[in-house]
Image: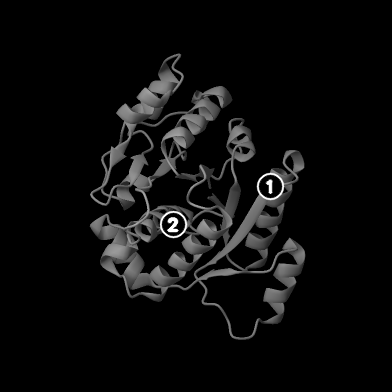
């Protein structure tokens, strides 16, 4: 999950997407148990732990300060787990340079997570550091969270071009945040879709009350505002992801 601009709500989308992937699967009793992990790679300002009331972990700091390659045992020891069963790898508590971890470590981490989880949701920093490349090349899909303002659409276009330069077959979904799906798209919506060469399928309405309650309680929207239109629309996003990438596959978003 990438962000077109700061403050667009990408972390909230990532957290609740991961939660909805987990919730959706738990409703089907006949299906084998599945697992979902969310990883906060915004090493300096990551807030995934805050959104889920999980204390900061030192796993990523260990990668930065030692010559450690994160295998499956390291993953098992480094992940926290919420009451709902969501696996969480938080950003470290202490400030660290974005380049403190290597591309090889990130690639190894993703591979280990894919071996142990059915879905891996990664919350990316806005900065395009060197280790972003293995994240992109090992992803089944990139979701760019944006709005329809001109600066955000331009930033989204630049991100798309960056991701596709070395990965022309990569699936990219554009998620319009803080805006309800219009019954009839306005001229600026159509122009934004033309610039991005994308049909806007995912719209997340602005719901300050629900979003604030989720952050304040450190719980996903499904637990504090299950009937909110915002929660329902993130559920639709999760179902679309699950349809494109069946739950039996090891996938990475």
How far across and down, in percent of the image, does residue 175 sit? 57, 63
Q: How many marks?
A: 2
Q: Secondary structure at mark 1?
A: loop
**In this view of the protein, can residue 170 be seen by the observer?**
yes
Crowding at label 1, few (<14), some or many (≥20) Cα neighbours within 10 Å?
A: some
Apparent side of residue 250 relative to residue 130 in the rendered image (left or right): left
Above or below, 112 against 88 in this view is above
Above or below, 105 against 48 in this view is above
Q: Secondary structure at mark 2?
A: helix
Figure quadrant of residue 163:
top right
- Which of the pair 16/212 is nearer the observer? 16
Crowding at label 2, few (<14), some or many (≥20) Cα neighbours within 10 Å?
A: many
> Residue at the location (33% across, 62% down)?
27
**In this view of the protein, can residue 45 be seen by the observer?**
no
Q: Which residue is mark 2?
A: 17
> Residue at the location (39% across, 32% down)?
95
Q: Which residue is mark 1?
A: 170
Which residue extends farthest front? 30
Which residue extends farthest top? 67
> Residue at the location (56% across, 23% down)?
104
């Amino acid at each position: 999950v990438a962000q077109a601009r700061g403050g667009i709500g990408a972390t909230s989308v990532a957290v609740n997407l991961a939660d909805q992937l987990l919730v959706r699967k738990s409703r089907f009793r006949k299906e084998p148990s599945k697992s979902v992990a969310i990883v906060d790679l915004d090493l300096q300002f990551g807030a995934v732990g805050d959104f889920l009331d999980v204390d900061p972990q030192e796993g990523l700091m260990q990668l930065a300060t030692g010559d450690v390659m994160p295998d499956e045992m390291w993953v098992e020891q480094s992940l926290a787990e919420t009451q709902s069963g969501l696996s969480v790898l938080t950003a470290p508590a202490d400030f660290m340079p974005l380049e403190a971890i290597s591309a090889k470590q990130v690639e190894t981490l993703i591979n280990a997570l894919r071996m142990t989880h059915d879905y891996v949701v990664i919350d990316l920093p806005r900065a395009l550091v060197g280790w972003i490349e293995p994240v992109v090349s090992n992803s089944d899909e990139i979701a760019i969270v944006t709005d329809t303002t001109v600066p955000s659409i331009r930033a989204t276009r630049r991100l798309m071009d960056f991701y596709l330069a070395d990965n022309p077959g990569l699936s990219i979904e554009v998620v319009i945040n803080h805006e309800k799906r219009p019954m009839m798209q306005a001229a600026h919506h159509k122009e934004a879709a033309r610039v991005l060469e994308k049909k806007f399928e995912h719209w997340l309405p602005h719901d300050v009350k629900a979003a604030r309650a989720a952050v304040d309680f450190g719980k996903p929207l499904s637990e504090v505002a299950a009937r909110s239109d915002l929660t329902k629309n993130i559920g639709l996003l999760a179902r679309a992801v699950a349809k494109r990438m069946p739950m039996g596959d090891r996938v990475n978003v």
